[in-house]
Image (cartoon, rainbow, N blue to C red):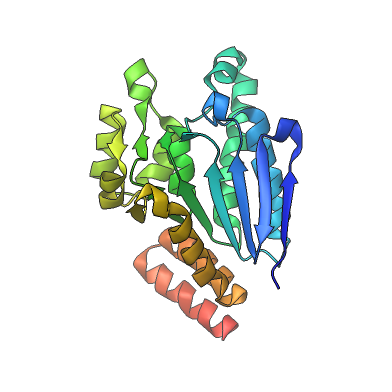
């Protein structure tokens, strides 16, 4: 019998966690602020990912959000009020570390997008291993519209979709719909709003049924070989195969 636990994490419940059947669901819970990535929320995500990495009972992670917006990026109020270069650098390093932790986790992460994802919110979606979005969802890297290039978001976005599509998003700053996001490869699927829960649940059940050892090995080797030349990648996966099997 599967068990379900719900945990409201610190910092005024800005991040919620529930676990059921090997699936940990993390819910961004700052709807009044567009679920923007405040320093506290980034820290909570990082601590939670680090805890999950050591938890063999978790086989899949879902990231979703409360409210009509998925994530509108970094908290601009915090960013504008951070004046000193060292403070800005420290905040950026923490966020980059959190995003890298997502890739390093042995468990696959699915973005369950129910609304608008912009700037670092779009980056969050791009960093997830898989992404399913409701048809009403929209995506953008809109910094250029206010004189700010989406510097950090371009890292994940340009590694997820083609350079031409990434530059289109970065240069126009315009929202794209879920159908276009799927065509670009930013998300895997766009589904009817009412079908979002069912489709994500179906996908997580399927992944959770697989060998956690195989999935972890596969995720790690997938991202490592992407950073290599083709020749080095073949040598690397051959060594992984010998050690693993």
- Say which residue appears at 66% left-offset and 39% top-offset: 15
45 above or below 221? above
Q: Position of residue 78 (x, y in %)?
A: 60, 19
* Residue 174, image x, y percentages: 28, 29
Q: How many marks?
A: 0
Height in image: 118 above or below 1? above
Q: Observer-nearest residue: 158 or 41? A: 41
Would you say 243 lies left or right of 150 here?
right
Identity of the residue furthest to the front in this view: 194
Whether residue 159 can be seen here: no
Picture quarter containing residue 30?
top right
- Is 179 on the left or on the right of 16, as rendered? left
Residue nearest the viewer, comparing 237 with 34 = 34
Q: In x, y percent, where is residue 209? A: 56, 75
Quick check: 156 left or right of 183? right
Q: Is residue 63 something that shows in the picture?
A: yes
Quarter of the image that includes the C terminus = bottom right
Q: In the displayed structure, does residue 194 sit left or right of residue 75?
A: left
Q: Is 123 drawn above or below residue 79 in the view shown?
A: below
Which percent across, then down, holds residue 123? 45, 40
In which quadrant will I find the N terminus? Answer: bottom right
Residue shown at the point (68%, 31%) measured from the top left? 40
The vertical placement of 15 against 171, above or below, is: below
Name which quarter of the figure residue 41 lies in.
top right
Residue 170, picture quadrant: top left
């Amino acid at each position: 019998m599967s068990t379900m636990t719900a945990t409201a994490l610190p910092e005024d419940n800005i991040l919620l966690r529930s676990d059921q059947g090997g699936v940990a669901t993390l819910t961004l819970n700052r709807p009044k602020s567009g679920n923007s990535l405040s320093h506290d929320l980034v820290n909570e995500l990082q601590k939670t990912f680090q805890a999950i990495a050591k938890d063999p009972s978790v086989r899949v992670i879902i990231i979703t959000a409360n409210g009509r917006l998925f994530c509108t990026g970094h908290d601009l109020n915090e960013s504008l009020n951070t004046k000193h270069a060292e403070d800005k650098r420290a905040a950026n390093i923490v966020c980059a570390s959190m995003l890298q932790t997502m890739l390093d986790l042995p468990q696959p992460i699915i973005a369950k997008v129910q609304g608008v994802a912009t700037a670092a919110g779009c980056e969050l979606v791009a960093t997830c291993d898989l992404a399913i979005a409701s048809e009403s969802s929209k995506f953008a890297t809109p910094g250029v519209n206010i004189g700010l290039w989406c510097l950090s978001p371009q890292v994940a976005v340009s590694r997820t979709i083609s350079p031409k599509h990434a530059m289109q998003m970065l240069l126009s700053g315009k929202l794209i719909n879920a159908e276009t996001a799927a065509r670009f490869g930013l998300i895997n699927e766009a589904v009817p709003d009412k079908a979002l829960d069912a489709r994500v649940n179906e996908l997580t059940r399927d992944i959770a049924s697989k060998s956690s050892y195989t999935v972890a090995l596969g995720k790690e080797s997938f991202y490592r070989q992407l950073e290599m030349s083709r020749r080095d990648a073949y040598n690397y996966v051959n060594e992984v195969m010998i050690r693993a099997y």
